[in-house]
Image (cartoon, rainbow, N blue to C red):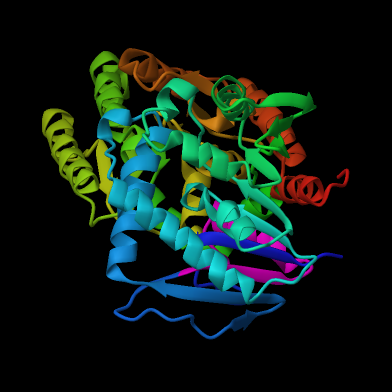
Amino acid sequence: MSRLVVVSNRVSPIQEGEATAGGLAAGVLDALKGHGGVWFGWSGNIADNPEPNPAREVGPITLFTIDLSREQYDQYYRGFANGTLWPALHYQIGLGRYDRAEFAGYKRVNDLFARSLLKLIRPDDLIWAHDYHLLCLADSLRAMGVTNRLGLFLHIPFPGPGVFMTVPSHAELIKSMCQYDLLGFQTEQDRAAFVDYAIRHAGGRMVGEGALSIYDRIVKTGVYPIGVHVDEVRAQAELAANRRVATRLRATLLDWLILSVDRLDYSKGLRQRFVAYERFLQDYPDWHNNTTFMQIAPPSRSDIETYQEIRRELEGEAGRINGRFAEVDWVPLRYLNKSFPRNVLMPLYAEAQACLVTPLRDGMNLVAKEYVAAQNPADPGVLILSQFAGAANELDAALIVNPYDEEGMAAAMNQAFSMSVEERRERHASMIAVMKENSLERWRERFQADLQGESP
């Protein structure tokens, strides 16, 4: 069997036997822990004279990391990846910028990753790169003579051509992406957007199911919705040692808890969510004094001004809403600008009667799936989900909302709290069935099989 080499922007600081964060890190570990392999990426450290770090073994996984210089970090990570690509890929082009020096720095770090990988890979290794930081990695590896099978999975959305073309280097990025043998997307909409660009603007043509002939190569595209370990999440939610925080929380609440958990990011629709909750309190006063909305929003990219502005804005909105509606014995909105480990979050998910997952645009959003998995099937809560989250394509038994429609979101909150237990059970069972079909294992197996050129 070919060895799997995973490449991502960051390598998480994992410990054997410990749970890791969700999303990319959980998916990478799931892919590697069964048969072993290599995980390569940035250490998260900035150094004056960056050097490769010693290899580290965690069970069957070998971790290789490199440091970055301040200039590399500023141009590659803060600059092009998060200042240009992130807003464009999330349809927030008004928040993006473009600097040629930053794009050059982005390519140089992709070259740095490629040079470092050359020392690690074997001829039959499968190389699986992750996310928007590494769009040019395959181009760098091919230029260095690497002929291995190369795949890229994009965890975030891919926008329509009209939006992607606002990035001045769009053509070069697409050509670089086409040096991968397999390009994986969260939804059919994302895959179709890439194919649309490839055909209409890059001279590509379809030559089979999901396959493009482009730049004298055959590039396979596919849809691989990432999932969660449903049974594991439920077990974490019910574990007695994990339930202490949830038990203390329940003692401080009245009846109904709405929970949201998001990184502090403008793509998550946090301001719109706060305004919608304010509208809910305004339009449905019967829920006053027995409803609490808790927003957990860990800091994200706090050295970038746009993210500092989001934090200031949300702190102001939370204070204003509480000032308008709070009573001496009731605070309607709790805003926590800090992170919590998974063993705390899973029981909190199980405790909440509703979960607001309302991004303006998202690749998948695993919070939605974790919330559903954590719920008690006999008395489940209600998921309120943005139509612009990738999860909405699978979890259509949720209450689907438009995050720009504050009145509609407020009505969904009222519907969630008014819903009969029979309807809640039916909706929950439908979503669990889909999630077990599109599990984290299934995501990994399908992508690896397609990358290797085999049927799953």
Horizontal and vertical percent for residue 94?
Answer: 26, 29
Q: Is residue 78 magenta?
A: no
Q: Which residue is located at x 62 percent, y 41 percent? A: 178
Between 225 and 279, which is closer to the camera in this rendering? 225
Q: Quadrant of the C terminus?
A: top right
Q: Give x and y (percent) for residue 344.
A: 46, 59
> Which residues make up the magenta segment?
19-42
Q: Is residue 315 left or right of residue 126?
A: left
Q: Is residue 123 left or right of residue 20?
A: right
Q: Quadrant of residue 403?
A: top left
Instruction: Say above or below: 200 vs 155.
Output: above
Residue 37 percent across, percent down from the top left: 71, 70
Q: Residue 1 vs residue 264: left or right?
A: right
Classify the position of the N terminus by image quarter. Answer: bottom right
> What is the quadrant of residue 280 in the picture?
top left
Name the residue located 38 percent from the left edge and 78 percent from the top edge. 50
Residue 39 inside the magenta-drawn segment: yes
Seen in the picture, residue 269 relative to 183 is either above or below; the reply is: above
The residue furthest bottom is 54
